[in-house]
Structure formats: C-alpha cells, structure tokens
Image (cartoon, rainbow, N blue to C red):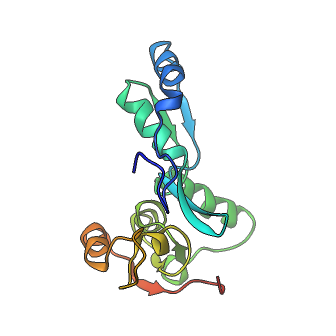
Amino acid sequence: MGEDSDCFRVLSTKPFEADLKLCAEKGIPMFNANPDMTAITSIGGKQVFHLCQGSFAKRYEELGGEVLYFGKPHQNIYDYAFRALEQNGIKVDKSKTIAVGDTWQTDILGGNNAGISTALCTKTGITAGLINRGSSNKCGADWIALSNIVQKSPPHYLIDGLAKP
C-alpha cells in the first residue's frame, strides 16, 4: 500500500517522519480522537484509500511517543456517551443499543467491548472498499480475509448500509 495505484493513494507516514520523531524525542504527547487507520474517499470517480489519524498515532508510538486515545474502539468514548445521555435524562439500555459502522477495527471492536450489539456495513465505507465480491476490482480483499480478521470480535449483524450509496 505504499504506492499510487487504481485504488490506493500513497499510504505512508514518511512525509511526516521528521516531525513525528522530533515530537516523540521531546516527549510531546499526541492526542488521538479518531483511531481509524484508513478511510476511503471518491476522487475523480475512483474510490481511494487514504491515511487517517490512527496510522499516525501507531507510527508515533513506534517512535517512542506517548499517544492518548479518545474514540472508538476505546472504552472512554462509550463511557462518555452513556454518561452524557444519562445526564440528559436518557436511560441507556445496552440490550437495546447498537453500534453501526463500516470499520471492524474501531466501530465493531469498540461496540463489542462496550457490551452492545454491533452491525458492520459491508456496502458502504471502508469495509466495502476492502471486500471483493468476485468483481474485477483489484482493490478488494476477499470475504475469507475479512472473516479471518473479525473472528476475534465478530459483528452481531452484517448490513449493506444505512443509506443508498
């Protein structure tokens, strides 16, 4: 994934390496509010992957930097959301709550860890870009690869999405 192609932008933190190293060496903590590693965007009619904040946080930790996480899949975001709802008079019934998302590593893992049901969107967002359903799309992985990833913490439901793409 380190090169341009039909579906990948340059997915590398290398252009930021010197700055990341300098900050890590100075002991400056990084605050990461969106641990997603990649996202998918439409550019010129093509679906392309690009890096998100989680990729930079991971590299920062590899360089010895401290990263403070707030956001899926970390429990603190769910605690915050449940507390905020309850402070506003909304009783949270986890058995009637569901996390819906397009990324297993953050959306599904986080919801599962928070003790709520989860639904993975398979035709929208990042997962759609990773799944190859037998098309000639050379950008996708296959269902077997996806199932190997999610076996550790599978979604309760697979859905196409919440809106038509």
- Residues 68 and 87: in front is 68
Q: Is residue 135 above or below residue 129?
A: below
- Image spot of residue 4 (x, y percent): 48, 51
Residue farthest right in this picture:
88
- Residues 6 and 123: in front is 6
- Image spot of residue 8 (x, y percent): 48, 56
- Image spot of residue 2 (x, y percent): 41, 45
- The residue positioned 53% from the left and 29% from the top of the image is 16
- The residue positioned 43% from the left and 85% from the top of the image is 158
- The residue positioned 45% from the left and 78% from the top of the image is 117
Residue farthest top in this picture:
26
In which image quadrant can residue 89 be found? bottom right
Viewed as shown, does residue 105 lie left or right of 146? right
Q: Quadrant of the C terminus?
A: bottom right
- Residues 70 and 129: in front is 129
Q: Is residue 101 above or below residue 87?
A: below
- Image spot of residue 12 (x, y percent): 46, 40
- Residues 124 and 138: in front is 138
Number of callouts: 0
- The residue positioned 71% from the left and 61% from the top of the image is 87
